[in-house]
Image: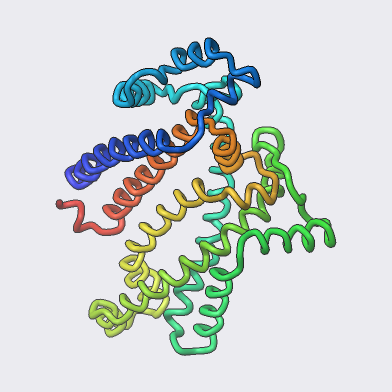
Amino acid sequence: MLAFLARRVLIAIPTIILISVFVFALQKLLPGDPLLVLAGEERDPEVLEFLREKYRLNDPIPVQYLAWIGNALQGDLGVSLRTNQPVTELIAQKLPVTIQLAVMSLIFALVIGIPAGILSAVRKGTVTDYIANVVALSGLSIPNFWLGIMLILLVSVKWQLLPASGYVPLSEDFWQSIKTMLMPAFVLGTALAATLMRHTRSAMLGVLSADYVRTARAKGLSERVVILKHALRNALTPIVTLTALLFGELIAGAVLTEQIFTIPGFGKLVVDAVFNRDYAVVQGIVLVTAVGFIFMNLLADALYVVLNPRLREQ
């Protein structure tokens, strides 16, 4: 088990290094100079030169990269050119908001998608299967921004059941924070639920036709035990992988939903940094997001070992 996980970690390390190189190099290829905005309207050459020296922009690119990655390994991702705040501080402020949204969205997706996928596979070819597939296709087809606007109009404006926008930290008011996040989490969760439903259905159909499932039924086990204990356990491996990737995707891709519901999370920070050419913030966000994806994959690998005892011997 430890050897299996150690191999995954060894693969992750060069992946992170390669990603950091790409992040830094591609950022340098972007047009425009953020220091021209930072220097003000006068753009005094002496001020520009001072800023270039301050942020080490006159150094060769390899030297800049080594300095940046060295500081990143110590938890220093630089300073925002616009606000003069440490990038790690900005990320620490915004990331918990998006993580809360992602966790709630994933709960919606898991609660809706996996049971629907199991039901669709068990009742293949029936009206239930047909309805589940239609609903899943609708969830994949409906744009998040349209669903979000419709929910605001109906749930908030017409019925006045939930807040239309804004965010309240969990530490300030737990239930109000949950209320403000319910609609955006549902908007993101429905699309993920459709994806999970389709993958769960495919995995379950493959498992239900396996010999050991037929053997379990021949032994007289109840259909519930056969499906939940024998079939679902073996079908969970691809679902675990997908769930880990979807969680990382939620953190990185909740930009539009956060804009619609005015949530001050990671998405708004990304948009502002890109438009302001705040290179240090963009680099920090992309690096943290990439490391988050890799961490979720490592977590999925660890769950494989729990779900599949054969991996413990490798």
91 displayed left or right of 66: right
Q: Position of residue 103 (x, y in %)?
A: 53, 49
Q: Position of residue 17 (x, y in %)?
A: 28, 35
Front residue of 179/234: it is 179
Q: Is residue 92 above or below residue 116?
A: above
**Residue at 35%, 35% in the rendered image:** 25
Q: Is residue 148 above or below residue 128?
A: above
Q: Is residue 267 above or below residue 156?
A: above
Q: Is residue 138 visible?
A: yes
User: Quadrant of residue 138 in the image?
Assistant: bottom right
Front residue of 53/281: it is 53
Q: Position of residue 162 (x, y in %)?
A: 76, 53
262 displayed left or right of 86: right
296 displayed left or right of 34: left
Looking at the image, the residue that sits furthest to the left is 314
Q: Position of residue 98 (x, y in %)?
A: 57, 43
Front residue of 27/3: it is 27
How is the protein colored in the picture? Answer: rainbow
**Residue at 38%, 62% in the rendered image:** 239
Q: Is residue 96 visible?
A: no
**Residue at 39%, 39% in the rendered image:** 26
**Residue at 37%, 21% in the rendered image:** 71
Number of labels in the image equals 0
